[in-house]
Amino acid sequence: MDRLISPHDLKRKFPPPSFPSQARKSAERILFGKENRLAVLVGPCSIHDPLSAREYARRIKKLAEDVEETLFLVMRVFLEKPRSRTGWKGLLYDPHLDSSNDIESGLRMARELLADLAEIGVPAAAELLEPLASFYLDDLISWGMIGARTSASQIHRQMASRLSFPVGFKNDLLGFLEPAIFGVQSARKPHSHFGIDPYGHVSQIISSGNPFTHIVLRGSDKGPNCDAASIEYALELLAAHYLEPRLLIDCSHGNSGKNLERQKEAFVSVIEYAASDPNRGIAGLMLESHLLAGKQPLPEDPACLAYGRSITDPCLSWEETEELIRWADEKLSLPTSMSFVQN
């Protein structure tokens, strides 16, 4: 058993700039329809190489400045990879890609990367899988996700309730929305739960509730749920549960069948839907993208990996991503899209 660095010591080593709190304000306003922009959470399926992640972030920063009138770009910095069976679990767990399971190095690399992105002004989105890890990284994240496997988890709902940024709950693996909706409702309430204090001691945590929780449609093995009928059904269900009819669409996973062409089709379809009536409840989209298209297997020797290509789910290339985002910017700039702001 190896004792890990405390959150206090790691945060002191890589202190947070003020940028994440600024980005959160934009995220919150977009989530509740108070800005006439859509959020696009875009980036690698998972981060395995901080160097290529930093290069991707520099490109996102430049593109974000060009489309800021219509789109709020948030980089996917997914440091954990949930597994139904086995496999590489993410940078936090195995940062050297060699099964050495150097979690302390993973925490340091993750926090340093997030701090660097914040310094250059790139908002970060992360999937929140291990609740204890959130105590080390929470001040550098602008948007969080609870995955399809954990939306029904009380532990994850408790974690979300103490966080001060938007957190999306995805529909479950079978496509049911209720676990995500109940997760949203639960995380908006105060909770008392186990956690760790800044010095790493097991503690009782009292949360105040997170008003910025929402659902994410990610499809399922049964098929996509990013079509107009599915979106309208989800919005009606939210209203029936006395929740704001606002949601995100994940264009990957079940909405694409992990097929890159279908991911692009899903993105185009949702943008056209949002542009046709900007008050319909779409707050944003998610897109898996890296420097190079596709994915590659993790070899025995990590030095053999191609630079900038995913080792988990297949991703769009940077060129395809930029083309899609610039098209969306033009589409949303048309006069039919000008009534997006809600009072």
Image (cartoon, helix red, strand yellow):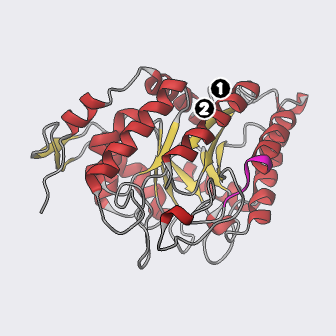
Left or right of residue 69, residue 21 in this image: left
Q: Nearer the viewer, residue 199 or 160?
A: 199
Tell me if mark 1 has few (under 14), some (14-19) or many (20+) residues whose alpha carbon lies within 10 angstroms of its own: many
Residue 75 image offset from top left, x and y in percent: 57, 41
Q: Main secondary structure of the magenta part?
A: loop
Q: Which residue is at a point 64% across and 30% down the rendered structure image? A: 61
The residue under label 1 is which amino acid type? Answer: Glu
Task: Find the distance from the CA under tag 2 to the CA under tag 1.
Answer: 5 Å
Q: Quarter-wise, where is residue 232 in the image?
A: bottom right
Mark 2 or 1, nearer chain start: 2
Question: Can residue 41 be seen at all in this image of the molecule?
Answer: yes
**What residue would you read off at disc 2?**
30
> Circle 2: is it few (<14), some (14-19), or many (20+) Cα within 10 Å?
many
Tag shown at residue 35? 1
Q: Residue at x 65, y 65 (%)?
A: 314
Do callouts 2 and 1 mark residues in contact (Cβ within 8 Å)? yes
- Magenta residues? 315-319
Extreme residue toward the right, this view: 335
